[in-house]
Structure formats: structure tokens, C-alpha cells
Amino acid sequence: MVARSPKEVSRRSSKAWDCSRLPSRGILKKPSFQVSHACCYGKTKIEKECEQSNLSKMMDSLTLVAHSKPVVTEVKKLYQSFEYEETYDESTILTVKFSLTKERLDALKEAKNQLTFSDIFEIPDIIDMVLDKAKDDTFGLYNTFYCDAYWLIKYVDIVVNQVFMKFKINDCDMLTYDPNRNVFDDTTSSRLEQTNIIKDHISYCDWIATTVGPNYRQKNVPAEIKDIFVTMITKLKKLVTDENGCSSWITYACNLF
């Protein structure tokens, strides 16, 4: 999936949010609980089952972003990110422990602070902490999983961009990569493709996190989205830590800085 700048197209006007593909009553604006009178119970149950079915269909449609063949795109289109979502501007155990703030990420992005070995090496630990939060039994109350996942994604996005800059490729150049490739070597071209695949995946994660944002505090996020989000973050960990044919991408990135 190629991230688009908010200036080019609103995330709310994306084809993925075409009204014809959404449940008639909305999937993210409706509370996860519903109070109804006994006489309306049958109707309410049917409506819930219908919405559940429609939501599942919409979630299935998202698999379209998992390309089945090589992708060709301009650098300037691949290496863009969504703007910060103010909803997630809060302190959690994870954001405090790893100093994940907009100010710090902006500084890293603008090269005010050079990435260090520890900045990159701690990414798997951050991912594990986020996935542990997803297993928390208090998820139905107030859980910071979405907030923590959001800052993880933003942080990894910055790191991936910094690694990409090491390749010194022009913004107008065309990039070709196969999202399904999982074996790499230590050649520059192979590492470049690996970096592009990770960025492509990060763009998808960022889309989910940004879309969920307005509903995060109201706890109106359907369980199906959480399950997909967990799957995507689990895949992210595999993409950066797998050692298929060579050292992991994390090790490679650490050696660059």
C-alpha cells in the first residue's frame, strides 16, 4: 500500500471509505454496546449480526493492499506519512519508557538528532510491549493498545525513512519491489527492496491507526479491527527481525548509524 499525503487526498475521502462499501449505520461511529427494550431485542440482534457481517466483508476487502505482484511507484509517493493524530497525544507507560513524543520524532525526522544503535535496536522490544498490551484483559475498559501501537508505527516510520535516506535515491526515481519477497541478501539492491517492503507495510498500519484515531477515546473500535491491527504489528516484527538469508533488517539498520 502506498501512503498518500493528506494534502493529496483526504483519508476520509479514500475509496476505502466509499459509502457503498460501509455498513449503512457506520462501523466506527456506533458504540460497541447498545441498550434496547425487550420488545426490540429480535430486531436489534439482527441489526448487529448484519453490521458484523458487513464489517467482516469490509475488512476482507483490505487484503487488496497486500499486493500479489511487484509494485512500481515513485519514491515521493512511497515515502510519505499521515499527519499526527491529536487523539493519541497522551502519555502511557510505553511512550514514557521509550520517549515516544511528537517533538522527539520531529527532531529525528529533521536530522536534528542522529539515530543511535539503541534507537533502532529497541524496536523489537517496543513491538513486544505493544502486543502484550493487546492481550491485556482490561481491553474492554480503557486500554492504551491503540495509542501505543500508533506511536510504535510513527517511530518505526521515522527509522525506515532515515535508513532509506542512506541509499541516496532521488524523489522522482521509480522503485520496484515485491511485497511477498521474504529472502534477502546483503547487496544494496536487496536491502533497498527490503526497506521498501517494510515502508509499504508501515503505510498500511498507519492508515489503520489514523482512521481509528477519532474513535479511540470513545472505545467505539470494532474487535475485528483490533484483530487485524494485531496481525499487522506481528507481521511488522517479522519483517524487521527475520533472518532469511542474511542478518535481520534491524541489524542492518544498526550498522548504518
Image (spheres, rainbow, N blue to C red):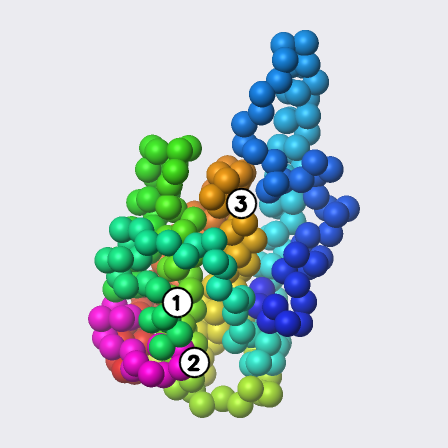
* First of labels 1, 2 by sequence position: 1
Relative height, residue 5 to residue 145 (above, below): below
Q: Secondary structure at mark 3?
A: helix
Q: Position of residue 77 (x, y in %)?
A: 59, 76
> Quick one: 247 or 38, which is closer to the camera?
38
Q: Are marks 3 and 2 in contact (CB under 8 Å)?
A: no
Residue identifier under label 3: 215
**Picture layout, residue 52 above or below residue 16:** above
Q: Nearer the viewer, mark 3 or mark 2?
A: 3
Q: Would you say residue 202 is visible in this rendering?
A: yes
- Disc 2 secondary structure class: helix
Dot 2: within a 10 Å radius of its alpha carbon, few (fewer than 14), some, or many (20 or more) residues? some
Kind of residue sitting beneath label 2: Phe
Between label 1 and label 2, give the one nearer the viewer: 1
Q: Residue at x 62, y 18 (%)?
A: 36
Which x, y percent locates residue 179?
52, 66
Calculate the distance from the C-alpha at mark 3 to the C-alpha at mark 2: 33 Å
**Residue 119 shown in magenta:** yes
Q: Look at the image and say whether residue 99 sits in the magenta stretch.
A: no
**On residue 102, which mark appears?**
1
Q: What percent of the width, then of the height, locates residue 88?
A: 43, 54
Label 1 SS: helix
